[in-house]
Image (tube, rainbow, N blue to C red):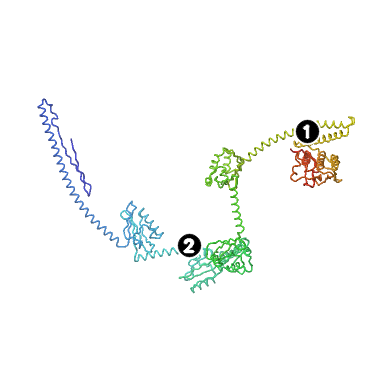
Amino acid sequence: MQVVIRATGSNLRRRKRAQRTLTATFSLTPFAAHAAPPTSVADSILLLNATIQHHEYAAFAMTVGVLVFAVLCAVLLARTRMRADANADAQQQEITVLRGAIERAHTLINAEPQVLVMWPPNAEQAEITGDAGIVAATDTSLDVLDFDRWLDPEAARMLANAVERLRARGEAFAFPVQTISGKPIETDGRVVGGRAVLRLREVSGIARKLAEAVQENRKLQQQMDGLRVIADSGSFPIWLRDDTGRLSYVNEAYAAAVESTPADAVARGIELLDQGTRGELKLGVSAGTAYSKRVPAVVAGQRRAFDVLSIPIARGSVAIAIDASEAEALRAEIKRMVDAHRSTLDQLATAVAIFDAQRRLSFYNNAYRTLWDLDPAFLDQSPSDSALLDHLRAARRLPEQQDFRQWRTQLHEAYQSVDAREYEWHLPDGRTLRVVTTPNPEGGVTYLFDDVTERLEMARRFDALIRVQGETLDNLGEAVAVFASDGRLRLSNPAFGRMWRLEGADLANRPHIEAIIAGFRRMTADEEGLQLLRGCVTSLEGRTPIERRIERNDGGILDCAAQPLPDGATLVSFIDVSASVNVERALVERNEALVAADRLKEAFLQHMSYELRSPLTNITGFAYFLGEEKTGPLNERQREYLGYITYSTNALLAIVDNILDLATLEAGAMTLDLGPIDIRKTMQAAAEGVQDRLVKDGITLKLHAAPEIGTFVGDERRVRQVLFNLLSNAVGFSPQGGVVTLGVQRQPDSISFSVSDQGPGIPEELKDKVFEWFETHSGGSRHRGVGLGLSLVRSFVELHGGSVHIDSAAGRGTTVTCTFPDKRQSSHTAAA
């Protein structure tokens, strides 16, 4: 077995010695490695004792080796420590020497006011040494590298760029700068020992004066450059003369005026002004006084006027010529513009009054004079603002004020204000004026007076109308909602929430139409109608009004209408028509029943009329045969009874004919047989039909018809039937011994028949019923008919295209007028 132990020592100063290695090797050979095996017990015991002794020797040898190694290590350690102590003493002496050198360097650096800034290689943090107070006398803790704090912006930017080039490329620099407080500082930048070093040193003595002179020269040069730029860029000729009177400088405007260049004009001495003017300028310079005069000059071939100002300076003079011709033209243009503005203001409905800086009236328009009803002669005297107010107050045309002086003082504050002010004057005559006071740039105030009485009244009416509309909308039974262009609910009335069972708080949050339709779905299954409503509200193009009937789940029926509004909104309304729809359904069912009954009635009348005519014809025929002598003699009573039978059958036959005619008219199947009608003959034929009744009741019938009455086109049979029914009705209602009158008159386009009686008349409430079927009223007379005559009269007249009019009152008889159109040529079919 081999054991290797190494001890390493290091030199604390140089660290260059090699390691030393101490190796101790012990070789142990086992006893009896090649011995023969024991042959007996005694030999085994002897062999065991020998083996034990060899192990003790090996342990002893190892212990001795370890002790020797320890001694050697201790010796080496002692020698190493001695060398380290010697090196430490040498280094301490070197540190002492370096500290002394550093202190001497700091002493040299601080010997004069300066600051050193050093940047180590590849390091951003700078080391600053020296007196920082040279850049800021009151703040020594100032960060020197913050150049903007102690230099003007231009110098700070120049120094920062120089430092950046020094650190980046090692470019050295040196130039003076001046702090904000005016202290001159010399800057010096260079690379020393691989480090960028910036030195800031306060300049004193001659160097300081030189630096200040440089700074002053720089400022003067900047000012001179600025003045030269201003002069060259100006539009007015400017020139300088030296103490001998020669041109030393002219600007671009001067050179352009003399049609040359500045250098050429100075070199050749080209003059702008004439010799006389130059002599006057020279005299002014010699006297040391400024010269100012308007003189003529020729510029670019045009004669113009200039206001020349010449001022003497230390060595020569400076002069400027201002083009006065343009100023005069501008002044004239301004005057024309002012006159145009005043002419425009004079046409305004707004009253305008302008007061100058002395508070006197300088302008007023017609509206101002008319508003206050002032005398033009008084206004043309340019009264003061206060005098005008006093005059208006004396005439009681101003608002009533408790303290007029204070009110006037507050109004006149506009002369010292820079902002326009607005007032509202309520005049004693009930008018309301909006008054605006606007300060003028040149001094003074402009007053604007607007009569807003009508506008305020309209605003009040509008507000009242809005409130009325709001109250009306809220109290409508109809549900109304307005959706904005974004689909959100803008307004709704309480009926809308009640009809669809929507909470008021939810509606107040302006829900979208989608949320509203979701609420509708809880009460109706009409998805198609809801989608139509949604499309009308949210569609961007093709928005058309919709009308739809929506049935709710509870059986209610609503009429929905959506109307797009001009501003992009949509008006949606719902009307509960459940009751009207139910009534409509009931009426439809009843109407269908009435139509069926009417058809049954017509069929019944036609059938019964036909069935009645046959037996009546037989009765009439047999009654006629009974009256014949060849049938056999009849006594007086039998003849009387036979007359009654004949009269009754004729009356019944007439009733049946009337019923048939009415049924034909009602069915729309009756046509007119038009032709020329002799008016007088028709009247006489109708009168003959009632002749027996006239004789029986002692009634007188009077016919009034002009001999030249002539004819008209119509159905002669129906016209005669109309007149007969009217006469029968008049005779039936006339008292015994009364008078019935039948008259006719021709108008330009019509023929009017009138029948008058002296009967009891028709009450007002019955006038509309006398033309209905089976309507009959005796009115206290002995007449009692079936009520079909006047119905046929109106039907036949209207079939001709005419009209029937009744003039009657209780107790003064009745006049019925039938008007037929004249020259009617075509056939007409009665309407159902």
> Which quarter of the figure is the C terminus placed in?
top right
Could you give the CA–CA distance between mark 1 and mark 2, rounded to whole angstroms? 126 Å
Query: In the image, residue 203 lies at what x, y percent?
Result: 34, 63
Give the residue drawn at x 81%, y 37%.
673
Query: In the image, residue 423 lies at what x, y percent?
Result: 56, 61
Picture quadrant where residue 550 is located: top right
Picture quadrant where residue 794 is located: top right
Q: In front here: 414 or 329? A: 414
Give the residue drawn at x 51%, y 71%.
291
Query: In the image, residue 202 lies at what x, y percent?
Result: 34, 63
Give the residue drawn at x 68%, y 37%.
591
The answer to whether one can see residue 540 in this image is yes
Relative to 525, 795 lies left or right: right
Q: How many labels does the image show?
A: 2
User: Mark 1, residues whose alpha carbon is within 10 Å: few (<14), some, or many (≥20)?
Assistant: some
Q: What residue does disc 1 label?
A: 609
Q: What residue does disc 2 label?
A: 229
Query: In the image, residue 796 lies at what x, y percent?
Result: 78, 40
**Amino acid on which disc 2 is placed:** Val
User: Mark 2, residues whose alpha carbon is within 10 Å: few (<14), some, or many (≥20)?
Assistant: few
- Label 2: state its secondary structure: helix
Q: In front here: 660 or 353? A: 660
Of the two numbered discs 1 and 2 in the rendering, the one whose residue sits closer to the viewer:
1
Q: Are the two marked residues, 1 and 2, in contact with CB atoms closer than 8 angstroms?
A: no
Q: In front here: 381 or 64? A: 381
The answer to whether one can see residue 800 in this image is no
Picture quadrant where residue 696 is located: top right
**Amino acid on which disc 1 is placed:** Ser
Q: In front here: 477 or 654? A: 654
Relative to 91, 732 lies left or right: right
> Which quarter of the figure is the N terminus placed in?
top left
